[in-house]
Amino acid sequence: MHEVAPAGSDADQSRSLRARDPTPNAPPSPAAARRWRPVHILVACGLALAGVIIAGATGMIMAAAVLDEWQGTVAFISLAVASSMFAIGAVALLGVQQLRSDDAAVEAHAGRAKNVPTHAAHEDVAEQPQPRSQREQAFFLNSVVEHIPVPVLVKDVREQRYVLINRAAEDLLGVARQEVIGKTAYDLFDERTADTIFDRDLEVVEHTGKLMHSTHQLETPKNGARLVASHRIAMLGENGETEYLLGVIEDVTERTRADERIKYMAHHDLLTGLSNRALFMEKIEEAGARQRRRGETFSVFMLDLDRFKNVNDSLGHPEGDLLLKETARRLKSSLRETDMLARLGGDEFAILQSAEKHQQEGATGLADRIIRIISEPFDISGHKVTIGTSIGIALAPKDGVEPSELMKKADLALYRTKSEGRNGYRFFDPQMTADADALHQLEHDLREAIARNEFEVHYQPIIDVKSRQPVGVEALARWRHPQRGFVPPDQFIPIAEETGLIIPIGEWVLHKACADAMTWPPYLKVAVNLSPVQFRKCDLYHVIWGALVESGLAAQRLELEITESVLVENESDVLAMFNQLKSLGVTMALDDFGTGYSSLRYLTKFPFDKIKIDKSFTQNLTKRAECATIVSAVRALGFGLNILTTAEGVETERQFDMLAAAGVNLVQGYMFGRPCPASELDRNLVGAAASRVESAA
Ligand SMILES: [Mg+2]
């Protein structure tokens, strides 16, 4: 190693290495030979041909001279020219022969380069490469080190000074080798970095001959902080003592950043920067381990934003994203440093609350804070947006410690909060699991119910206020469960909508209602309720057309009832479908008016034939004056827009009188008949028809 010299002391090392001819007697390179050979051959062949032609011509001239007794001088000159040309041709042919020999030598040269023995190579031993001199050897090694694409540094052990660095090391440090050679780490780096280097060098020297690896931060003189993986070894000199320290350094900054980015993306939600589900589960796992070790309690919150979908649908997804970001910021502000917030997807968030002295009180306090801050209006791109949040909470270890178990229980509590009106919180209790199991069983039974023909259609009369006579019926789906008896519609309809089973159920009800209506007097209309799912997912136009054609019912006798929730989604698509259905000749009723958005815009945009006032207004008519006011206002609205009004839920004569006084056109409710099967309805209708005939008479 004594001969190791600073690499690159001659800037043109590599170029001079390439330019230098290591075998002076070597044949010309194949490229050089091929550059001049064709010209020579062409000239030589031309001269030879000319010699032959002139020799032939000279012979002919000599013959003519003998025959014509020409002078001997002419013959002599001709003979001399012919001889000269022969000589030139012969020399040219010899030249061609020489070229062929050169070709053989070139091929032998190429053969050696490929380690393929050739005839020519064996013949000319003098062309074998000669052993390099010491100087050449050092030059060669220097060149190799210089071109290694990773930084290499060699340091003298005694003085701790750099004696060699290559080009890649210059690039890493950002300084030329002249500024490094002969310097110590303390001359080049800040003190902290130099201390680190010194300590590592010491460690390497103590383990001479052993390759040591480490990854650490390196504050370079010009390129800032880099993360490097260094591989170092101490080398012995000729005297058997440690003489040099060789370091090969890998700059892993970019690779590490990319790895960190990938890791970050795998554990975070990119929109809000919060932890994602995977990281959240890991943190619950860790909290569970702490609970087992030290008995620390923790709580898992699951959150769902109320009415977020409306914002997304009405303002658009970019505004929806802004709302999610702002929600994340508000939620974060309500937490302590020991708590963790995650976005699980969509409008679902989760919180891990730890280190609460009084667990239940702490969880209640946090839930209250969250509900309060999320209920405050948001300003999204100039729009005032109000949402709410529903929360489910599971407590560990009371409800378990396993991540999936806690998440499931918090989710069940959340589901309960949502089903009880949203914008609140519920703690998990074991009854929720039992209810959920029952619900799953119900869902399973519902799937079977269609095949088992367990559905029925019941009909409730719709009465004309003036004549008190039935003018139609509303068809209502009923499920007669083999064990449970009748399952209330508010229990199975939401499940049917969630599972999509409402489509086959709705279609069956429609066909049955149309078929039944064909057996009734022609002045009776039949009203069928349509679910938003049917509007979204099935080819409603053809379904309704098919039911009319199959039953033979006149389209004018069929009324379709939809709620406002149908209208808020994809308004233009819904309007197109709405008009298609109206083109069949059926009438359209806006159901449960007053309970939802009650947007008057829908009444002008969608050409409804009827407004049905929700039963909650009817039932409070005699108790709350504002209900009577609303009923009167809706009636006035209907009158102005030429739309009939029906009041639902009429149970008493007093209610009927008030509705009649308000000018409502139609009523339905227990006062005039509960929903009943078609067979019972027939008797009522026969009675009604009889009284009609009587009153007509
Ligand atoms: Mg209805």
Image (tube, rainbow, N blue to C red):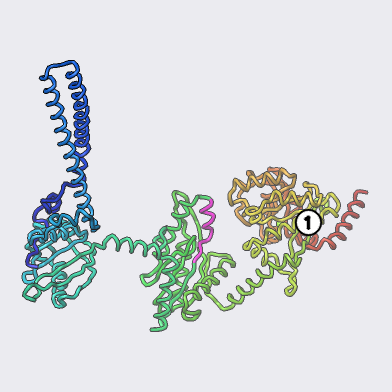
- Judged left or right of residue 80, residue 117 is right
Q: Going 16% across and 16% down the picture, which residue do you hit?
A: 69
Disc 1 designates what residue?
513
Q: Secondary structure at mark 1?
A: helix
The range drawn in magenta is 303-313
Q: Which picture quadrant has residue 682? A: bottom right
Q: Please indicate, yes or no, whether residue 106 appears anywhere in the rendered image.
A: yes
- Judged left or right of residue 18, residue 372 is right
Q: Which quadrant of the picture is home to ligand 1?
A: bottom right
Q: Nearer the viewer, residue 354 or 552?
A: 552
Q: Going 48% across and 62% down the picture, which residue do you hit?
A: 345
Q: Nearer the viewer, residue 68 or 592?
A: 68
Q: Which picture quadrant has residue 339? A: bottom left
Vertical side of 211 occupied by 541: above or below: above
Q: Position of residue 436 (x, y in %)?
A: 60, 73
Q: Position of residue 269 (x, y in %)?
A: 42, 61
Q: Nearer the viewer, residue 591 or 107?
A: 107
Q: Going 43% across and 77% down the picture, which residue do you hit?
A: 298
Q: Please indicate, yes or no, whether residue 222 appears anywhere in the rendered image.
A: no
